[in-house]
Image (cartoon, rainbow, N blue to C red):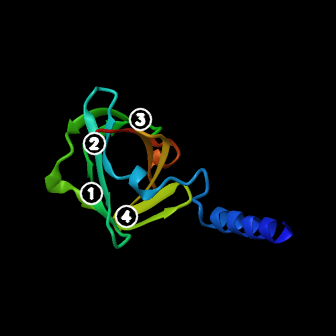
Amino acid sequence: MTKLMLALLGCICAIAQTAEPPNRPAPKAFTGTWKGTCADGKDFVIVTLAHTEAGNWEGSVQLANMRGGEDGQCQTVVDPPSERHALKISDGRLQGAVLSFRGSSRAEFEMTLPAPAKARLRFLGTASEDSPWELQRTR
């Protein structure tokens, strides 16, 4: 009986070590298209993310030309986001519950998921770093 209990305890420990931590979302949770809506009701940011079989992150960030408040939040869209001026995602890595990636050498982002279809995007080095943009999954 003791040997059986030890074997069972060993199996439980092995499973617990390989399980994802409860607050760590899987890469699939981040994949898809995410949009942020400005105070004027227009889209001002579109993030498209894919996680490859090789473990890399691909996608883009499209930003509108906009007017914002001191808190980094969008007040008015001047020119909508466009694929023509999209920033290609590179250096993506998921650490804990935070997905970080670059859109260029001067554009770094961090994304978290407070709910399955909601995200918060921090644009590092800007006012939105302390006041993240709220995004909704569209697909």
Q: Position of residue 50 (x, y in %)?
A: 31, 58
**C-alpha distance separating marks 4 and 1:** 10 Å
| Residue at the outermost front position | 1
**C-alpha distance separating marks 4 and 2:** 22 Å
Q: Which residue is mark 2?
A: 139
Q: Decide: is 6 above or below 83.
A: below
Label 3 crowd bin: few (<14), some (14–19), many (20+), radius 10 Å: few
Q: Which residue is mark 3?
A: 69
Q: Position of residue 102 (x, y in %)?
A: 37, 64
- Give the mark, 4 or 1, whose residue is nearer the N terminus: 1
Secondary structure type for disc 4: strand
Secondary structure type for disc 2: loop
Q: Which of the image's four quarters has the N terminus?
A: bottom right
Query: Quick check: marks 2 and 3 in contact, CB under 8 Å?
Result: no
- In the image shown, does 26 or 8 lie closer to the viewer? 8
Q: Which residue is mark 1?
A: 60
